[in-house]
Amino acid sequence: MKTYLNNLRIPISVAVLLAGLAWIWLSRVPEGSRSNSLEAAQVGFSAPVFTLTSLDDQNIGLADFKGKPVILNFWASWCPPCKAEMPAFQQASLELANTDLQIIAINATSQDSLNDVRQFIDQYEITFPIPLDLTGSSAKNYLVHSLPTTYFIDKNGIIVDVIIGGPIPLSLLRIQANQLLTD
């Protein structure tokens, strides 16, 4: 029995070594990759670009705000924390109207209805851009798995912070906005 186990030691060791080398090879970073050149929905990476349409058929894209900091919120009309935080986003938008910072709230329309979105915008008197993610592609690109999710993007298009969940209070939006505007 001992000889049998000794005979298996080398093949098992080789298999473990090969599995380790395969894992290292598969998890390597592609040559030329840098955090500021890749799009990924993570802190330190470029924010994925998008172009979506609003309820009034206007195209809204991240590229429209190039060189400006952006607070990007993903929400839905049926989401209780989204409802709770939207007045803070609207107030922050009004307070920041004379700055370069832009608040954008992408509606997860693939999980919502256009009528509910329209009622939500009217109810909360939202004046900042509300693009509609009809197919869910932007939510997918931003790795949104729960609502609300908010990204803080600096003037260079780099994600500097992410908050998953909510509601985000106005005081935190002010702090984040100030940080984005001073960087």
Image (cartoon, rainbow, N blue to C red):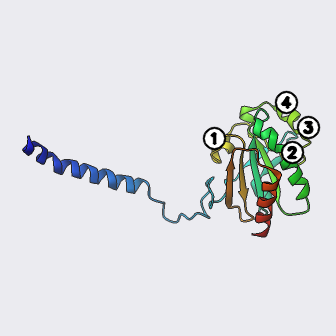
Task: Residue type at mark 1: give it.
Answer: His
Q: Report which residue position mark 2 lands on.
A: 87
Q: Nearer the viewer, residue 30 or 78?
A: 78
- Nearer the observer, disc 1 or disc 4? 1
Q: Nearer the viewer, residue 164 or 36?
A: 164
The earlier-in-sequence mark between 2 and 4 is 2
Q: Answer yes or no: do the residues labelled 4 and 3 have beta carbons within 8 Å? A: no
Task: Residue type at mark 2: give it.
Answer: Pro
Q: Report which residue position mark 1 lands on.
A: 145
The earlier-in-sequence mark between 2 and 1 is 2
Horizontal side of residue 34 vs 106, given as left or right: left
Q: Report which residue position mark 4 lands on.
A: 115
Quarter of the image that includes the C terminus: bottom right
Q: Report which residue position mark 3 lands on.
A: 122
Residue at 79% x, 59% y is 65
Residue at 72% x, 49% y is 150
